[in-house]
Amino acid sequence: YLKISEGCNHRCTFCIIPSMRGDLVSRPVGDILKEARALFDGGVKELLVVSQDTSAYGVDVKYRTGFWDGKPIRTRMLDLVQALGDLAEPYGAWVRLHYVYPYPSVDDVIPLMATGKVLPYLDVPLQHSHPDVLRRMKRPASGEKNLDRIQAWRA
């Protein structure tokens, strides 16, 4: 497992994560890639990218630019996944994304699956789809929009 952030900025009524883990804190992109390289060097063949809210990676730092191997790379999901895919390729390793909420930013990651940079698999935590239930849960989502987005990803 490769943890890319800790915590969550949402305050859903059923969830204790923010009170236990705090707000979202994204790890520096260079630190993540350094750990990924060490895992690949150690023989890991499948990297499971995890956090409480993988899709929100970088939001807390306003997608600031970090560095990896002397090159600038933005702290955001697309750039991180692209870099992880590039890093995994010479090792013949896979990158798999977990806890990916259907945010618009994920739309940009989907084409990487077609290129083989990341496995065509998303672990999408959906708690409900009914608007009244989502509102009571204080979920920042719309069941209808989520369904539309996921259908577009599958196309």
Image (tube, rainbow, N blue to C red):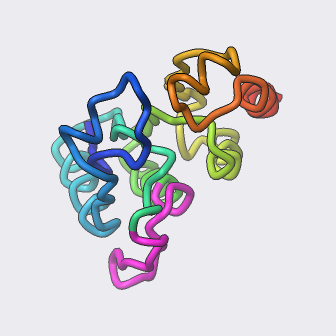
Q: Which of the pair 103/9 is nearer the observer?
A: 9
**Which quadrant of the structure image shows residue 50?**
top left
**The stretch drawn in magenta includes residue 136:** no
Drawn side of residue 14 relative to residue 39, left or right: right
Q: Which residue occupies 81% across, 29% down?
A: 148
Q: Which residue occupies 55% across, 23% down?
A: 136
The number of numbered discs placed on residues in the rendered structure image is 0
* Bounds of the magenta segment: 61-80
Drawn side of residue 118 relative to residue 132, left or right: left
The image shows residue 110, relative to residue 77, as above or below, that is: above
Quadrant of the frame with the N terminus: top left
**The stretch drawn in magenta includes residue 76:** yes
Q: Position of residue 51 (x, y in %)?
A: 33, 41
Q: Which residue occupies 56% across, 57% down?
A: 78
Q: Which of the pair 8/41 is nearer the observer?
A: 8
The image shows residue 63, relative to residue 26, as above or below, that is: below
Drawn side of residue 89 relative to residue 120, left or right: left
Q: Position of residue 52 (x, y in %)?
A: 35, 38
Drawn side of residue 145 relative to residue 37, left or right: right
Q: Position of residue 132 (x, y in %)?
A: 66, 18
Q: Position of residue 3 (x, y in %)?
A: 27, 45
The image shows residue 12, relative to residue 85, as above or below, that is: above
Q: Which of the pair 70/57 is nearer the observer?
A: 57
Quadrant of the frame with the C terminus: top right
Q: Which of the pair 96/102 is nearer the observer?
A: 102
Q: Which residue occupies 36% across, 45% down?
A: 8
